[in-house]
Image (cartoon, coloured by chain):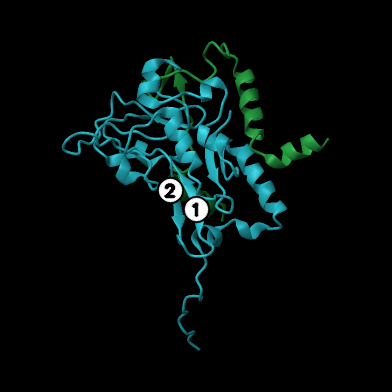
Amino acid sequence: MRKLWVIGIAAVLPLIAGCGEKPTVFKQGQYQGKPDNRPWENDQFKGNQVEWEKTIKARNQNQNENSRSVASAK
Amino acid sequence: MARMKFLCDAERCIECNGCVTACKNEHEVPWGVNRRRVVTLNDGVPGEKSISVACMHCSDAPCMAVCPVDCFYKTSEGVVLHDKDLCIGCGYCFYACPFGAPQFPQDGAFGLRGKMDKCTFCAGGPEPDNSEVEFKKYGRNRLSEGKLPACAEMCSTKALLGGDADVISDIYRDRVLKRGKGSEIWGWGTAYGRPDKPAAQPEKKS
């Protein structure tokens, strides 16, 4: 029975190998061979990724009028 | 790491085309090129629904798969961008894209198909951030300024949400629950419609 399970899993694995999101690699200033820099690599954020993410997160929440109205009611 | 996505709430979109205008204005997109547009289903019929469509920055983007010169790339924030210096304007990406996102300038005397242009999630392209050359080729790079796409940020009814997928889906989910709806708002039936009459089933053999 266990052997059957192993064979079954081995048969299914190649079928699902293509599923899922491929990780994006940023290497030597390039994305998949195309030069670009990351959004926090500029004069404004000076390479501070945490600061950039914090800014974007706050900006994201600006779209949530429910939280904005609650905050303004306080 | 944020994974950037757009989400349009069809129950809120009022077809004002503010997102389209914001995009055109922000990036000074040429005449005939619409990085974003509003599509209305059942136009003129009571209960019509509108949705704002642009590049959806697919997780497994078909445009990237079909490009013969491999001009596309994906950033660590999940934004699908392309290099206009590599693009040959073949149009394969247009056929592959389920949203009709790739646009081709046709300003030549013979309807010349120029290099592809599409929504960049306001993230510019492979040129120095906020440089003049980047603006000319790809438009403004708002993401590097710590801002979200202009279309989503200026949407008057906040129908169009743009940003970190986890955050905007939380906002949408919260909104739907506040409307008094539950799980029926998600799923196959909601996305693709329910048949008026259930399909005829073959008679069971006894």
Could you say which quadrant of the image residue B202 lies in? bottom left
Residue B117 badge:
none
Q: What is the CA distance from the residue labelled 2 to the residue labelled 1?
A: 38 Å
Residue B50 badge:
1
Image point 78% across, 39% down: which residue?
A: A70
Image point 30% across, 46% down: which residue?
A: B95
| Percent position of residue A21, x then y | 48, 38
What is the chain identity of the residue bearing mark 2?
A
Which chain does the cyan colour mark?
Answer: B
Q: Residue furthest bottom?
A: B206
Q: Secondary structure at mark 2?
A: helix
Q: Name above or below for residue A67 compared with residue B86.
A: below
* Viewer-nearest residue: B39 or A27: B39
Image point 48% across, 46% down: which residue?
A: B52
* Viewer-nearest residue: B191 or B8: B8
Q: Name above or below for residue A52 compared with residue B94.
A: above
Colour assigned to chain A in the rendering is green
Q: Secondary structure at mark 1?
A: strand
* Viewer-nearest residue: A57 or B179: B179
The amino acid type of the residue labelled 2 equals Leu
The answer to whether residue B58 shows anywhere in this view is no
Q: Is residue B185 left or right of residue A38?
A: right
Q: Find disc 2 in the rendering and name its residue.
A: A15
Crowding at dot 1, Cα within 10 Å, few <14 / some 14-19 / many 20+, comes out as: many
Could you say which quadrant of the image residue B162 lies in? top right
| Percent position of residue A9, x then y | 50, 49
The answer to whether residue A74 shows anywhere in this view is yes
The amino acid type of the residue labelled 1 equals Ser
Q: Residue furthest right?
A: A74
